[in-house]
Amino acid sequence: MLVELFLAGLCLNSTCVDEKITDAISLRKQKLDRMAAEIKGQHLYVTTIINDRLSGINATGGTGIAFDLFEILRKKFGFNYTVVWPNPNIYGSAKEGVIKMLIDGQVNLSVAFMPVISQLRDKVHYSPSLDVGEWVVLMKRPSESATGTGLLAPFTLPVWCFIMLSLFLIGPIIYVMVYFRTRYCTDNEEHYSFLLCFWFVYGALLKQGSNLSPVADSTRMLFATWWIFITVLTAFYTANLTAFLTLSEFSLPITAPDNIGRGRWKWITNEGNVIEEVIKLANVVGKGKENDEYRETVKNLGPRSTIRNASDENIMDTFVTKQDMMFIREKPIADYDIYDAYKKKVKDGTPENKRCTFVLTKFSVFSTSRAFAYSRHFKYYELFNDALQHLVEAGVIKYKMNEELPHMKLCPIQLQSQDRKLKNNDLLLTYVLVGIGIVVSISAFIWEMVYTTYYRKPKNDNNISYGHTLRGGVMPIYKGSLDKNNLNFQKTPPPPYHTLFTMQQNSENGGKRKIINGREYWVTDERQTGTRLIPARAPSAMLFQYTN
């Protein structure tokens, strides 16, 4: 019994709610029907903003998408209207522009995509939001990607910094380890100079190899670690460089709104554009979310602005193309500007790879809702709002915005070209490195010549130089002319005969006597050239010493 009473109460409550909603809807419908009957045959005065395809005015009346929508309302409700020229052609405020005309009652409504500004809601009425306006950056397509030049593109700046840091640190680390190893250990580990350690690191980086052969395990592990690091590094670098040169990846010099102000880029917009109003509103003292957004937008754009009363085509040709300025424009007008420029180049016979000279950023610098604005004395705004809401929900406005645009995205950032030919810009750093290498090598050559000539010139015995004998000794080499009864040898003369047969058993180079193929040789282990065979027979030994 209790359950039945509970369910009955729920049904009664729900019925009452439905009846109230139905009554409210019925009353609203009756009110709208009464307004529709009253407005029929009346004459309205409207104004607009001259804003390319969105709204405009000519000798016969209003033009643009806004008036296409307004014509739907006129045909539905049967009123007439007259378009009043805006003076001046700006959205304005309580003191000027279209807003002032609405406040003063000069016109009934503004047929334009007006930005919804909360500070003006007590002065004018707004229709339901027609769309969200986005102001983007239209700029000249850069000749090269902002990713970087060909040689530097595979790695980011922090990676390059760490590579250079490791290059300068590993040499001293190897030198210090080898130094303490040879100082405190009693094995045959050779002591490498700091210069040899540095050249090992540099040679490994360029995959040149090295003639250093460490004996100690610790030194070998350090050498192997550096080789593994270089192998992995070069593998990643080669793969990324190949991908960079193969794929047509392209990036713009700005990736966020604040890049414009930080980079001190110059930008331009039309006179009367919403961006101009945002700059004015940002200077108004006030608190609130919208005021903060206005100030943030002005801060992101920076101070290097230009506002001109000129057409989009003139701005693009004069300021964007020739002066590399950024054009702040709202969508979809910016899309239409690029489309018109593309069609013009097609008509002029411009090659396909040169038709997309402009590009749009993926981000917007400012966005806000847009709607029609009514005078507060206009009593039929609810009737218009109801009709406009149906048009928005039906997708009519979105369709009208993109009606004349191609279905595919025109002139995107990534052009998706089939071939990727290298340009001089890709190899510019290569040319610079070659030039630097040549200059450094010439400078080193000049220094070596000067140092050898003036700083290492023998002070005594100018006519005598010294050469090494087969056994590691030193013997004089006499210079001069045979005409003056002086010896003249261009190479080290043969050693004395007796030295060939008095090889010490405990020689520093560890030579051993061996018979190979029936001939007697001394087998020595040279650090630079490896194992060498020195003939032990007198004539062969003399020739070997003379030629080596």
Image: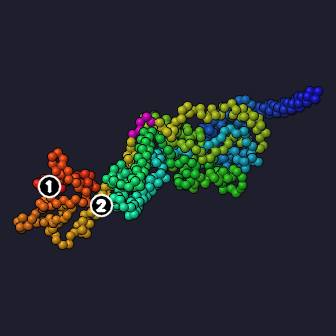
Taking the magenta stretch, the answer to whether it contains residue 418 is yes
Residue at 68% from the left image edge and 56% from the top image edge: 284
In the rendered image, which residue does mark 1 sit on? 541
Give the left or right position of residue 207, taking residue 452 as reference: right
Q: Residue furthest front?
A: 505
101 or 190, nearer to the observer: 190
Q: Which mark is residue 459?
A: none
Q: Which residue is mark 2?
A: 444
Q: Where on the picture, by quarter, is residue 70?
A: top right
Task: Measure the alpha-carbon separation of dots 1 and 2.
Answer: 38 Å
What segment is highlighted magenta in the picture?
417-421
- The residue type indicated by label 2 comes to Ala
Q: In the image shown, does 264 or 420 lie closer to the viewer?
A: 420
Label 2 SS: helix
Which quadrant, please, contains the N terminus?
Answer: top right
Circle 1: element type: helix
Which is more toward the observer, 238 or 535? 535
Residue, x 42% and y 57% (percent of image)?
A: 170
Q: Choose the circle earlier in sequence order: 1 or 2.
A: 2
The image shows residue 29, relative to residue 531, as above or below, that is above
Res 543 quadrant in image: bottom left
Which quadrant of the rendered structure holds the C terminus?
bottom left
Residue 81 placement (x, y as % from top left): 71, 36
Residue 281 visible in rendering: no
Q: Main secondary structure of the magenta part?
A: loop
Other residues around mark 1 within 10 Å, as few (<14) / some (14–19) / many (≥20): many
Q: Residues within 10 Å of mark 2 (few under 14, many from 20)?
A: few
